[in-house]
Image (tube, coloured by chain):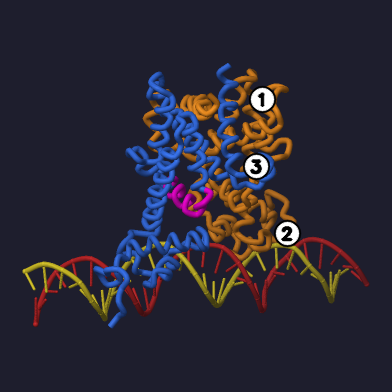
Chain colours: A orange, B blue, C yellow, D red
Amino acid sequence: MTLAQPEARPYHHGDLSRALVEAARRILETEGPAALSLRAVAREAGVSPAAPYHHFKDKGQLLDAVAHEGWVALDAALMKARQDSDDDRRRMTSLGVAYVTFARDNPALYRVMYDCSRDKDALPDQMKEEGAYCQVRNTIAHAAGDGVSEIDLELATIAAWCAGHGLAEMSGFKQFESLKTLLGGEEAFLKAVFDHLGMFAKFDRG
Amino acid sequence: MTLAQPEARPYHHGDLSRALVEAARRILETEGPAALSLRAVAREAGVSPAAPYHHFKDKGQLLDAVAHEGWVALDAALMKARQDSDDDRRRMTSLGVAYVTFARDNPALYRVMYDCSRDKDALPDQMKEEGAYCQVRNTIAHAAGDGVSEIDLELATIAAWCAGHGLAEMSGFKQFESLKTLLGGEEAFLKAVFDHLGMFAKFDRG
DNA sequence: CGATCCATCTGAACAACGCTTAGATAACAT
DNA sequence: ATGTTATCTAAGCGTTGTTCAGATGGATCG
């Protein structure tokens, strides 16, 4: 009856869970986070508004799935940045730039990722070996050598992560535009900000 | 006919703009950001669902007004922290702690403040004399002395602001709980993170 | 092969939302 | 007193998240 299917469709519609997540990402990219309603996702996937509820408990759980894909993509981006950079000292900055660049290139997805994290008051799966947070800590550990305590390592990771997240959310603000052109572009701006993180702390050290 | 009014009511209902903003803040505090609908605000203020539209163009503009009050309160909190701290070197950390503490004490309000900023891609009124951003820059300038260029000053301010914002959003995450108790509480944790901001940058400087 | 089961999907409905419109009310100016 | 204008209400539109009864159709077992 139906034409030849491009993919195996084990059930009525096919792998709807996956189709819904893909539809959600499509809407996010083309229309932004404000347009991401469950009904719109169902519409985009070609099913009724009630269909998603057989695969996700509620809208939040669908967003969780979208966010999960986002974290996987971010993990991969950071992994690539770590491998591309040969010099140990520059690796941290590369990582930071890669992080912010990912957020700037996928603003809607990044927003969903962090909205989900805030709802759960936690970063998901970040302590696993290839989780983004763990990658940052490993990179810092490698650059800092053996003389650093576990606590200092953890604190430095948190500091770096917070700076990265803050910059990811704010580097697009209009106030910084003139400074960016003055420094010669987005990436130069990001590196310059990372370079100045120390200024904040060193006053207090003496 | 009506009983004695506690306040002067120049028009039908009184100063409804103000009443609406106050109602919104009340809802934010008691029920959180998810419950903050225009209709709920109108209900809380005792007017019809359509009444707010005579004072605000749409829901976003009401939230803008709420956010503005939030920024004023944050400005005041930072000003107080600056004055309380006598030592020039510790002033930056005090400022950072005050910033994050404000966000942690008023999480729903802080969220509205930043959601509005993201919609406009800008921090509001931050370049004014008593704006929070300007306060941070002035404090850094004072601590750094005369040898710092305008650009370095701006970059250090951005770095500090990003770290503060990132920490404000993430210091409540469950992953950091054990570390917090290990360090002896929230404030010690915040100071420790700020102290480690330099670690991120110094690898790249050599 | 046929009957049954159960996951899957639809259609209709509910309450709540943002927002608009038309009309009532009341303060203000003349 | 009259008219103007700002303010508020009532009703309604289209949308949303969610639920539920019932239709649909693979999968499993006789």
Chain where mark 3 sits:
B
In the rendering, which numbered label is found on residue B184? 3
Query: x%, y% of residue A74?
Result: 62, 37
| Left or right for A165, reference B174 | left
Q: Of circles 3 and 2, which is in front? A: 3
The quadrant of the picture occupied by the N terminus of chain A is bottom right
Residues shaded magenta:
B104-118
Query: Does label 1 or label 2 sit earlier along the sequence?
Result: 2
Residues under numbered marks 1 and 2 in contact, where contact means CB atoms less than 8 Å apart: no
SS at badge 2 = loop
Between tags 1 and 3, which lies in front?
A: 3
Disc 2 target residue: A11
Viewed as shown, does residue B189 lie left or right of C8? left
- Categorize mark 2 by other alpha carbons within 10 Å: few (<14), some (14-19), many (20+): few
Separation of disc 1 and disc 2 at Cα?
41 Å
Residue at image location 62% in from the left, 46% down from the top: B173
Give the CA separation, mark 3 to mark 2: 55 Å
Neighbor class of circle 1 (other Cα within 10 Å; few <14, some 14-19, many 20+) is: few
Which amino acid lies under the numbered mark 3 shown in the image of this protein? Gly
Using the rendered image, report if marks 3 and 2 lie on a common chain.
no
Image quadrant in which you'd find residue B186: top right
Residue that appears at 51% across and 35% down = B93
